[in-house]
Image: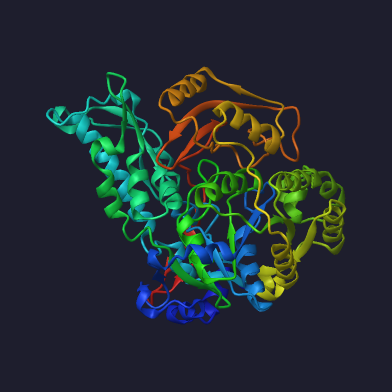
């Protein structure tokens, strides 16, 4: 069987100017990065056209460790929409090098539903992550310099600083470090650490910014800590947000590439979904909507994480509303939630499949809470049996939900025609706006409780003393009217990754609450959330190589 990389290399890739012509973008507006990649200037966005186009969100049930193929389905669906005569663009996040060299691999889709050039997109792309990393670390450097400086000193208490440094790599040894060792000329010693670049607040800010001025303002709003006199300090107090924005002058522009079938693809940004909003930039989404009838986009992990944040945070900041929501389900994931061992998911098992249906059921219920129009896409794998597919299809129909089998890995857009027709029909019929789950003016506790009880199915919410103390500080800072972006495991509807299926009678524990005032949300943290992942015993990097002709091998 051909690998994803084999399929990508065999594909005919068109000059990016040809893809731009499909969208109606003049060649003079392209900022070329070689033959097959280009950046798009922000002045191309047209708000009237944005509101006239159809936005389709792709989400999923609670995933297995390998994921359920949301990106592959998103790409396949966009290709399928073009095949039925709709002008469609897919808008996605950029891959992080951590997973590329780690355990999950790249994030460019798979099989005959991929974005190209696959190797470039997975490795550095147009340098956006590097720019975000530099802007983030500039703030860290300026911060430590201010603490060290005798004449230009804001009196920052180092014990209150939570701003770490970032790098786009899985490296567990950097999670906790001590900086400033080496004497009085080397800084003030303090404990800090590194997060992966995708977890940076600068990444979240870039993906929620509406333009360069808004980006600069949001960067200035980053909360740093307190002075010894208990005065709050923000990045603007360090006069660094202008320089940070200057580093991001190109990174703020979305990237135009293509799918295997020549469908336009806009790829931009990549915030984590379990600690941030988990979706591509507002700018990229609006760029796609400006030049397309349909835009297909995705939100990270399951509906309880990525889609909830997409709707309650991104859509409300951007003034967007999806016309249809696709819930990706796989036979293997449903069996996984029916307590089938991970190593046995390829084996047919109708009993485990029936038991795991409760997870799918809860996600369908959650979709209806937002008054969005749902479609379930069964992402087909080679090991799925007709009996298993029929069981899931019948279950969805019994819940009054449209369902389609998406055979997009093997067949590309052809394998998504049924899905595309159903999505297009629903998108045309559903003209109402989605209903937010909560009011931003509510108390933080009420917002958290609403999500925990209605979306996760929790019985109650508990707070540690540290979390309660943080809530008081947030209210004192006047930041309590921001939306909440709950950090939670993606493996379960609950905050316990061991509770599969549809857990009940559980308590969500908020152990601390962080401030992301630049991004514009509050982050209640539940469970153990990893911001700097580690590499597996056998990293994916061991399979990656390059030959003397510059051909990369081993990417997946």
Name the foreground residue: 57 vs 502.
57
Task: Give the quadrant of the N terminus.
Answer: bottom right
Q: Is residue 435 above or below residue 287?
A: above
Colour mode? rainbow
As drawn, the residue found furthest toward the front would be: 48
Left or right of 202 in this view: 113? right
Which residue corresponds to the image point at 27% horizontal and 19% vertical from the top-left?
228
Q: Is residue 352 above or below residue 409?
A: above
Which residue corresponds to the image point at 84% horizontal and 51% vertical from the top-left?
399
Which residue corresponds to the image point at 29% horizontal and 27% vertical from the top-left?
190
Give residue 474's position: percent from left, percent from top.
45, 26
Q: Is residue 385 above or below residue 67?
A: below
Visible residue check, residue 281: no
Give residue 140's position: percent from left, percent from top.
29, 39
Q: Is residue 402 above or below residue 87?
A: above
Task: Name the image quarter holding residue 346.
Answer: bottom right
Left or right of 42 in this view: 349? right
Left or right of 16 in this view: 368? right
Visible residue check, residue 175: yes
Give residue 325's position: percent from left, percent from top.
67, 56
Numbered marks: total = 0
Left or right of 29 in this view: 399? right
Task: Give the quadrant of the C terminus.
Answer: bottom right
Give residue 244's position: percent from left, percent from top.
29, 48
As drawn, the residue found furthest toward the left would be: 151
């Amino acid at each position: 069987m051909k690998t994803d990389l084999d399929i990508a290399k065999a594909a005919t890739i068109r000059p990016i100017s040809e893809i731009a012509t499909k969208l109606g973008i003049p060649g003079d507006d392209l900022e070329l990065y070689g033959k097959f990649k280009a950046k798009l200037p922000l002045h191309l966005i047209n708000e009237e056209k944005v509101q006239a186009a159809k936005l389709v969100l792709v989400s999923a049930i609670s995933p297995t460790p390998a994921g359920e193929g949301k990106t592959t389905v998103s790409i396949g669906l966009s290709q399928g929409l073009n095949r039925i005569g709709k002008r469609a663009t897919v808008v996605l996040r950029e891959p992080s090098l951590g997973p590329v060299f780690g355990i999950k691999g790249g994030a460019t889709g798979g099989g005959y539903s991929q974005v190209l050039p696959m190797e470039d997109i997975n490795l550095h792309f147009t340098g956006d992550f590097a720019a975000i990393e530099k802007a983030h670390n500039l703030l860290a450097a300026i911060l430590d310099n201010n603490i060290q400086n005798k004449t230009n000193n804001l009196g920052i208490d180092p014990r209150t600083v939570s701003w770490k440094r970032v790098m786009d790599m899985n490296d567990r040894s950097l999670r906790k470090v001590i900086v400033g060792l080496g004497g009085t000329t080397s800084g003030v010693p303090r404990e800090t650490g590194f997060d992966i670049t995708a977890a940076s607040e600068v990444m979240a800010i870039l993906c929620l910014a509406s333009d360069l001025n808004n980006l600069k303002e949001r960067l200035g709003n980053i909360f740093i800590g307190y002075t010894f006199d208990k005065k709050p300090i923000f990045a603007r107090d360090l006069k660094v947000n202008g320089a940070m924005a200057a580093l991001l002058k190109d990174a703020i522009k979305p990237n135009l590439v293509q799918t295997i079938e020549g469908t336009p693809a806009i790829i931009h940004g990549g915030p984590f979904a379990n600690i941030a909003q988990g979706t591509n930039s507002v700018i990229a989404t609006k760029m796609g909507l400006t030049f397309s009838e349909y835009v297909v986009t995705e939100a990270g992990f399951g509906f309880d994480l990525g889609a909830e944040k997409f709707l309650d945070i991104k859509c409300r900041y951007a003034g967007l509303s999806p016309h249809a929501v696709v819930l990706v389900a796989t036979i293997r994931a449903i069996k996984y939630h029916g307590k089938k061992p991970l190593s046995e998911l390829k084996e047919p098992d109708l009993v485990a499949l029936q038991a795991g249906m409760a997870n799918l059921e809860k996600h369908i219920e959650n979709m209806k809470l937002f008054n969005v129009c749902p479609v379930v896409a069964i992402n087909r794998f080679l090991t799925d049996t007709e009996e298993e597919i029929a069981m899931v299809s019948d279950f969805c129909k019994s819940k009054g939900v449209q369902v389609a089998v998406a055979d997009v890995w093997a067949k590309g857009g052809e394998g998504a025609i049924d899905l595309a027709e159903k999505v297009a029909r629903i998108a045309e019929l559903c003209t109402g706006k989605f209903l937010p789950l909560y009011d931003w003016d509510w108390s933080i506790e009420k917002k958290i409780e609403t999500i925990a009880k209605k979306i996760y199915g929790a019985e109650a919410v508990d707070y540690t003393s540290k979390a309660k103390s943080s809530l008081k500080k947030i209210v004192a800072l006047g930041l309590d009217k921001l939306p909440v972006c709950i950090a939670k495991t993606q493996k379960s509807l609950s905050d316990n990754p061991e509770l599969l299926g549809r857990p009940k009678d559980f308590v969500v524990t908020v152990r601390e609450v962080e401030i992301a005032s630049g991004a514009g949300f509050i982050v209640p943290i539940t469970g153990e959330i990893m911001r700097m992942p580690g590499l597996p015993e056998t990293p994916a990097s061991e399979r990656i190589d390059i030959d003397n002709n510059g051909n990369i091998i081993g990417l997946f």
